[in-house]
Amino acid sequence: MHDMEKKQTSVEKTRAVIEVEGVDFCYGSSRALKGIDLIVPPREIVAFIGPSGCGKSTLLRCFNRMNDLVPGAKVTKGKILIDGTEIHSPDVDPVELRRRVGMVFQKSNPFPRSIYENVAYGPRLTGVVEKSEMDGIVEKALRGSALWDEVKDRLNESAFGLSGGQQQRLCIARAIAVSPEILLMDEPCSALDPIATAKVEELILELRKEFTIVIVTHNMQQATRVSDKTAFFYLGELVEYGTTSAIFSNPKKRETEDYISGRFG
C-alpha cells in the first residue's frame, strides 16, 4: 500500500499544472512568503484563504509574474513551475505566460470600449484579424462566461453600461478569450452583491471543466462552495493545504481551526 501511495503521489506530481517548491518572496527586504510548497492539479479549483496581508494574493500574482511590475519585488528562493517549466527561466516570455495564465481582479476593470472590443482585445494581440473568426471567439467567450444571452444585442455598446456583476463576467470572458490553461481570480466577488456573487460562483464551477482555477477569497463560505482544495495562509506561511472538506471539517492545525471558526482574522 505504501508503494501504491508513493506511486500515486509521483503520478499526481507529473500531472501538476502548478508546482511551487520552497518559494520565498520579498518586497525589498520584507519577506512576504516563506518556504511555500504547493501543488495544483489540473482542472481543479484551489482556494487561498487567510487574513489580510498573509501572502495569498502575493503568491497568486507570482503565477503569472504580475509581481514583476512591482519595483524590488521578487522570488528570492525556490521555484515555480507551470506544466513543468520554471516560469522565471530567461526563455520564458512574461507576455506569453500571461496569455496562458489569465487573471481576474478584485474590482472589475473593463476597458473603456465596447463589450465586443473588450473580449476581442486579447485575440487581436495574438494575431486574429478575420472578422468571422473574431465573431466566433467573442461569442464563445461570452457564452463561456454566461453573459452572451444578456449582451448579444448590445455588443457595440460601452462595457461601462453593464452592471457590476456583468462587468466582472465580461472580465472573465476577456480572460478566457485567449484560451488560457489557468485562471487566477483575486477575490472576484468581493465588490458584488449576493445575487451577482452566486452567478459568478456558478460560472466558476462551470469553468472548471476547461480550466485550472486558483481563487483568493476572504469569504470562507465561498471557498466551501466552489473549491476542491483549500490552502490556509498565515503570516507568509502556508499553514495547511488539503481537500476543502477536510480543511473545514477536520483541520489538522490549531491556527487553521482558529481562523475558520472566527477566533481571529
Image (cartoon, rainbow, N blue to C red):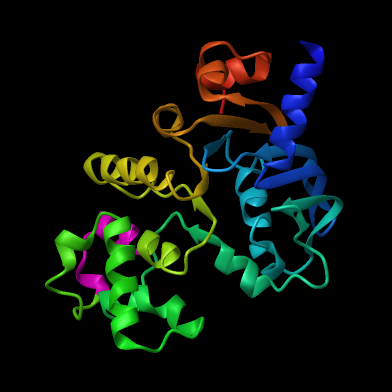
Does the image show residue 236? Answer: no
98, 180: nearer the viewer: 180
Residue 190 versus residue 97 in the image, above or below: above
Quadrant into which the N terminus falls: top right
Dominant secondary-structure state across the stretch colored magenta: helix
Does the image show residue 63? Answer: yes
Magenta region includes residue 169? yes
Residue 60 versus residue 34 in the image, above or below: below
Quadrant into which the C terminus falls: top right
Q: Is residue 39 left or right of residue 247?
A: right
Q: Position of residue 39 (x, y in %)?
A: 69, 38
Identity of the residue furthest to the right in this view: 77
Q: Is residue 203 left or right of residue 2?
A: left
Q: Is residue 23 left or right of residue 178?
A: right
Q: Position of residue 182 (x, y in %)?
A: 55, 54
Q: Which residues are magenta?
A: 159-170
Q: Position of residue 67 (x, y in %)?
A: 68, 62
Residue 111 versus residue 215 in the image, above or below: below
What residue lies at 67% left-to-right and 13% top-to-bottom?
A: 252
Q: Position of residue 187 (x, y in %)?
A: 46, 47
Q: Is residue 79 left or right of residue 58?
A: right
What residue lies at 26% left-to-right and 54% top-to-bottom?
A: 146
99, 114: nearer the viewer: 99
